[in-house]
């Protein structure tokens, strides 16, 4: 895989296969230590009990994290029927409902009602702030928390498997593709209510975050092994800084234009501006990302996120 868009040092995106247990913050801390750099961030929190794809941004790639926060997500979720949970997942206190347990046919008939744009109330145990305080902190303190509903989009929702070996507590495994900000815990809870029973999220694995999938994600063991002899061992695992931003058209700049962008100046690219996008990837002759820009009218582009310093020249970092 070409690394032409990486700048000097550890600049790029490390797609981590987060195991069950550590928080997303824990993963960032580990990568920060192994990479020997403070400039590390992640592209979307995963709860400790969840596993799967967690993009981690290093060095200059931290400048583009904001463009990934709205990326669609995909999950494989285990939904346990026959009980509700105070946290809407396996970590809360369970309460058995009065209604009969659902059948596979009932669940299959109910899933279409949760596709498309729906309204969803986030779990009380969430990181949403209410009056400056985290909802989960209020809930743990015994305070009543009623969060406002929000619109989310469920692109697809399909039943993968059904286990009714315990008829009163059947388990469904579903695949979900959804917009950023969707709470799969809330989806499980609401599905249980919709079929006249109750449900909570028993397990969750993120299978994709934007264009980053689990097939290319590195385990923590692989990351530790790669850095056994030093931080540079991470380089073969890094994706280019602009990976996942292919929706932004690319504009190749000549050297004077690169120098102007590095100084934060508007440019009128000699190569022209393709299409009518809201953002563009500005690259040098090697294909290295030098900035994200926005239209400024009159055939000009204004640098929005600049990733290089004035006078900096391309550096070969291998393949």
Image (cartoon, rainbow, N blue to C red):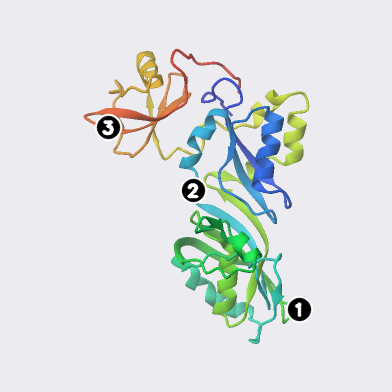
Q: Which mark, residue 166?
A: 1
- Of callouts 3 and 2, the N-terminal one: 2
Label 3 Cα neighbours within 10 Å, binned few <14 / some 14-19 / many ≥20:
few
1 or 3: mark nearer the eye: 3
Task: Find residue 71 and name its label.
Answer: 2
Residue under the image location 58 percent in, 60 percent down: 126
Residue 150 in the image: above or below residue 295: below
Callout in the foreground (1, 2): 2
In the rendered image, the quadrant that contains the C terminus is top right
Residue 296 tag number: 3
User: For the point 51% across and 55% down, which residue is it?
Assistant: 132
Name above or below for residue 111 compared with residue 239: below
Does the residue at mark 1 contact the one at mark 3 (Cβ under 8 Å)? no
Q: Is residue 94 left or right of residue 44?
A: right
Q: In the rendering, at what x and y percent does residue 283 appear?
A: 42, 24
Few, some or many residues within 10 Å of mark 2 (<14, 14–19, 20+)? some
- Disc nearer the start of the sequence (1/2): 2
Q: Residue at x 59, y 31 (%)?
A: 39
Q: Measure how far apart labels 1 and 2 are at the Cα level.
A: 37 Å
Report the front residue among 247 and 40.
40
Q: Quadrant of residue 186?
A: bottom right
């Amino acid at each position: 895989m070409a690394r032409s868009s990486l700048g000097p040092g550890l600049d790029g995106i490390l797609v981590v296969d987060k195991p069950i247990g550590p928080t997303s913050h824990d993963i960032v801390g580990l990568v920060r230590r192994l990479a020997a750099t403070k400039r590390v961030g992640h592209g979307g929190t995963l709860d400790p009990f969840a596993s799967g794809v967690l993009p981690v941004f290093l060095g200059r790639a931290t400048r583009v994290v904001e463009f990934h926060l709205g990326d669609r997500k995909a999950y494989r979720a285990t939904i346990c029927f026959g009980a509700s949970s105070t946290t809407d997942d396996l970590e809360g206190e369970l309460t058995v409902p009065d209604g009969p347990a659902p059948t596979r046919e009932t669940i299959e008939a109910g899933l279409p009602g949760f596709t498309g744009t729906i309204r969803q109330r986030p779990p009380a145990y969430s990181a949403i702030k209410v009056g400056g305080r985290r909802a989960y902190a209020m809930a743990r303190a015994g305070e009543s928390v009623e969060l406002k509903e929000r619109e989310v989009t469920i692109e697809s929702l399909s039943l993968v498997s059904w286990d009714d070996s315990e008829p009163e507590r059947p388990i469904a495994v579903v695949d979900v593709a959804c917009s950023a900000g969707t709470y799969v815990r809330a989806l499980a809870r609401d599905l249980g209510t919709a079929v006249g029973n109750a449900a909570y999220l028993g397990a969750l694995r993120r299978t994709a975050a934007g264009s980053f999938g689990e097939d290319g994600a590195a385990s923590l063991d692989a990351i530790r092994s790669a850095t056994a002899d030093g931080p540079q061992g991470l380089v073969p695992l890094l994706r280019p800084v602009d990976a996942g931003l292919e929706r932004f058209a690319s504009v190749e700049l000549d050297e004077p234009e690169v120098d102007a962008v590095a100084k934060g100046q508007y440019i009128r690219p000699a190569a022209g501006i393709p299409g009518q996008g809201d953002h563009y990837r500005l690259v040098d002759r090697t294909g290295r990302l030098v900035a994200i820009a926005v239209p400024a009218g009159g055939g000009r582009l204004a640098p929005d996120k600049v990733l290089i310093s004035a006078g900096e020249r391309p550096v070969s970092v291998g393949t």
